[in-house]
Image (spheres, rainbow, N blue to C red):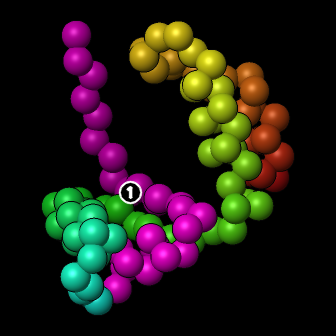
Amino acid sequence: MAWYFEVSSVSIELDCKQVVDGISNNLSTNSIFGAIMNTCKVSLMNHQNFKISFITRRANNVTHLLVKATLSYASSQVPDYMPSCIKTTVINEMS
């Protein structure tokens, strides 16, 4: 069984300013990094509802906790609940 859903707006926050600038700007370079950024840009052109922005690593606690949590799961299945290890951090950042 496959689950599909439509998202009206997606905000992607990255803590690497060079990647955000590479995707956001129309600069082209003849490097592997430039080729990857161009691939990302082309992919995002098909999804106008995506917004990419830079945030400091310090403000990215939920992401780092979530990555650590997913590394500890033996299964590749995605849970349909918020892992308890990030629940407190999410609540704190929303307030």
Bounds of the magenta span? 1-25
Q: Quadrant of residue 15?
A: bottom right
Q: Secondary structure at mark 1?
A: loop
Q: Amino acid at mark 1?
A: Ser
Which residue is situated farthest in the front direction here? 31
Q: Is residue 72 above or below residue 10?
A: above
Asked if 13 appears above or below 95 in the picture, the reply is: below
Q: Quadrant of residue 43?
A: bottom left
Q: Position of residue 2 (x, y in %)?
A: 23, 18
Instruction: Relative to 57, say whether 35 is above or below.
Output: below
Residue in the image at 66% along x and 32% along y: 68
> In the rendered image, which residue does mark 1 sit on?
9
- The residue under the point 83% across, 46% down is 92
The x, y position of residue 20, in whole percent, is: 46, 73
What residue do we see at 69% from left, 68% from top?
Answer: 56
Q: Is residue 67 left or right of residue 21?
A: right
Could you say where residue 83 lies in the image, as x and y percent from the top left?
Answer: 66, 23
